[in-house]
Amino acid sequence: MRLRTYSDAVKALNTLQSNFATVEAIRKSGNRKNVKTLLEMYEWTRRMGYKEEEFDKLNIIHVTGTKGKGSTCSFVESIISQYKDGKRISKIGLYTSPHLKSVRERIVINGKSISEELFTKYFFEVWDRLSTTESDLNEFPELGTGVKPLYFKYLTLLSFHIFMKEGVNTAIYEVGVGGELDSTNIIHCPTACGISSLGIDHTFMLGNTIEEIAWNKAGIFKKGTSAFTVPQVPEAIKVIIDRAKEKEVKSFQIIEPRSDLKEIKLGIPGIFQIGNASLACALASAHLTKLGFENVDISTTLPAEFIKGLEETTLMGRCQLIKEGDNINWYIDGAHTKESVKVSANWFKSVSKRNKRVLMFNQQTRDYETLIKILYNNVYPDITFDHVIFTTNVTWSSGDYSADLVSMNTNKDSVDKLEVQKNLAEIWNELDKNSRKHIFHDIQTSVNFTRSLEGPIDVFVCGSLHLVGGFLVVLDGDNKLQA
């Protein structure tokens, strides 16, 4: 039998993506997730050889929200890493999404993405178990022979398997979408749960109102668990409080931004990160207390370990600066929601100091018209762009995607015809007649064009994590770049 490689694993994983037609059919039907989603996750777990209660030994912190949940998870992971004692905490797992350059970024142990070797080994262990076990077709008619979970569900199951096999005893899980019916919500007894800032997003799955979205997000709360949220609009807070009572949480607290964090240089830049860092401190404190650590009270001042963890936190593709010699400053942020694009635009406005500027933007699947207008309204008239580039998320000028970035849930015909990019250019032209607009079919060509411009320049890359991921892949290997 031929040895199966990492490339084989990625190719197999990509077959589990929902294609564009399927995603659109679900979106148009208004058929939101139902409880069957979780029942199937429990069934896949059984077929893998686990009971969901076994995952309690991972000591999981569960985090959801519309924006900031990834940053919150990274802050939590960095804080807790300061308390590794080889016993209560020896291996820390982090499960987040989406990935930027490599799918292995989603599954991290002690601050490092799982290696290609281990990813491949465990990927095919799960694959083979699900291939050789069966479900009761009367109860699960859609789980016939050979059927596998969809992409995100599979990676969620894989993360549990990896963390169990590798002896992880603290894990931080970022929700994929929503909470109540998200595939991560098979967690039985987390040590703490948190909700970052909420907004209107994924409406075809979660609902059209902030109340519906808050109800979904608070679905991760569990009986006897400490639960936290950052301040939300009153309508959302009311729903979250009601859900906390319904779920019988141990305690519930609204975490206001900490004033003392203004004196700390957070590892993830941006004044808005203070709210995420404050939530992370509360989650980490509750977790460490539950594990028996002392002197982790944060009610008055932060322990030195917390401060060190916050300062050392890193998160690729979020408010990230990469310098290319003295000529180009690349300012990179994967903002892709209304709220996050506004925050990202204000971040760029606060850090860009050069007179010549370039915008590189794409958003292939969401309301790109609204997002580009939000970006414009939050930088102009303080910031103007000399050049504005609209590109697809295709990685290379050859027309290929990087293997880990293959996406089947976009309309290939639309991408090939540059439909979104042409529409974006028209919208921008109505907003700004002075900047020069450029449309490119791929990220590599966009980067090469930018490098051909006379500098020095500040370049703002935003609108999509998929764009940022492909951008970082293109930049990889260039030793002139400094993060």
Image (cartoon, grey):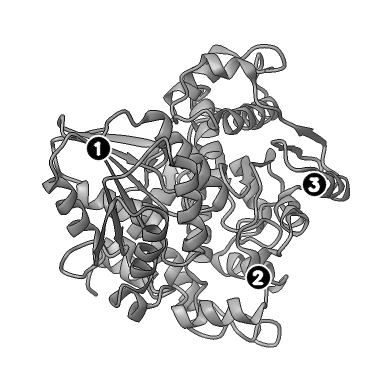
Of circles 1 and 2, the one toward us is 1
**On the picture, is 413 further left or further right than 214?**
left
Q: Earlier in the sequence, mark 1 or mark 2?
A: 2
Residue drawn at 63 percent across, 17 percent down: 259
Q: Which mark is residue 157?
A: none
Percent position (x, y) of residue 144?
Answer: 56, 85
Per the image, label 2 sits on a secondary structure element best described as: helix
Asked where in the image residue 459 lies, by quadrant, the reply is: top left
**If the image is split into quadrants, where does the N terminus sit?**
bottom left
Packing grade of label 1 (10 A; few <14, some 14-19, many >=20) is some
Residue that carries the numbered disc 3 in the rendered image: 240
The answer to whether residue 455 is seen in the rendering is yes
**Residue ID for mark 1:** 356
The first of marks 2 and 3 along the sequence is 2
Mark 2 neighbour class, 10 Å CA radius: few under 14, some 14 to 19, many 20 or more: few
Q: Return the residue nearer the eye: 201 or 20.
A: 201
Instruction: Please tell me whether residue 98 is drawn above or below residue 135 in the rendered image.
Output: above
Residue 410 location in percent, x, y? 41, 73
Q: Secondary structure at mark 1?
A: loop
Residues at marks 3 and 1, CA–CA distance in whole angstroms: 46 Å
Q: Which mark is residue 37?
A: 2
- Examine the rendered structure and indicate whether residue 426 appears above or below residue 281: below
Q: Residue at x 87, y 50 (%)?
A: 246
Identify residue type, mark 3.
Ile
